[in-house]
Image (spheres, rainbow, N blue to C red):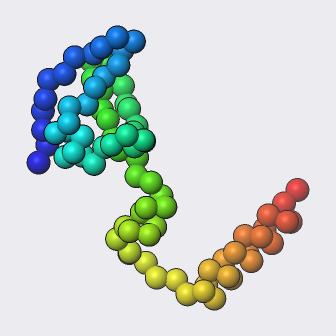
């Protein structure tokens, strides 16, 4: 469920995210966010940490060690052969 909360812009154009919005969206100190700006509109999106996603996120594909090694070797060979 999305929340709509009115807030004000402070000194130095600082926007304070209300506690209940931060808690609902998982934002805490140090969280990276992406801000998209347009005419009369701002969108704020949480940037998910890739390490956290890799270790705690939903798994949707499987790969064997041998497949990973084959792909790695192919990428290395392509890189080493690049002009």
Q: Position of residue 32 (x, y in %)?
A: 42, 41
Labels in figure, total = 0
Report the side of 60 relative to 19 (left or right): right
Residue for point 38% across, 75% down: 60
Q: Please, which residue is most extreme toward the top here?
A: 11
Q: Nearer the viewer, residue 34 or 20?
A: 20
Residue for point 44% across, 69% down: 55
Q: Nearer the viewer, residue 78 or 15?
A: 15
* Placement of 7 over or under 21, stated as above or below: above
Q: Which quarter of the image is occupied by the C terminus?
A: bottom right
Q: Position of residue 53 (x, y in %)?
A: 42, 63
* Placement of 82 over or under 59, stated as above or below: above
Residue for point 37% across, 67% down: 57
* Placement of 11 over or under 47, stated as above or below: above
Q: Position of residue 21 (x, y in %)?
A: 19, 38
Residue for point 34% across, 11% down: 11
Report the side of 77 relative to 21 (left or right): right
């Amino acid at each position: 469920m999305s929340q709509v909360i009115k807030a004000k812009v402070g000194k130095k154009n600082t926007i304070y995210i209300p506690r209940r919005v931060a808690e609902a969206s998982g934002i805490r100190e140090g969280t990276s966010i992406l801000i998209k700006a347009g005419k009369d509109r701002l969108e704020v999106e949480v940037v998910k940490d890739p390490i956290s996603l890799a270790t705690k996120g939903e798994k949707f594909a499987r790969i064997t060690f041998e497949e990973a090694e084959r792909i790695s070797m192919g990428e290395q060979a392509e890189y080493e052969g690049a002009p």
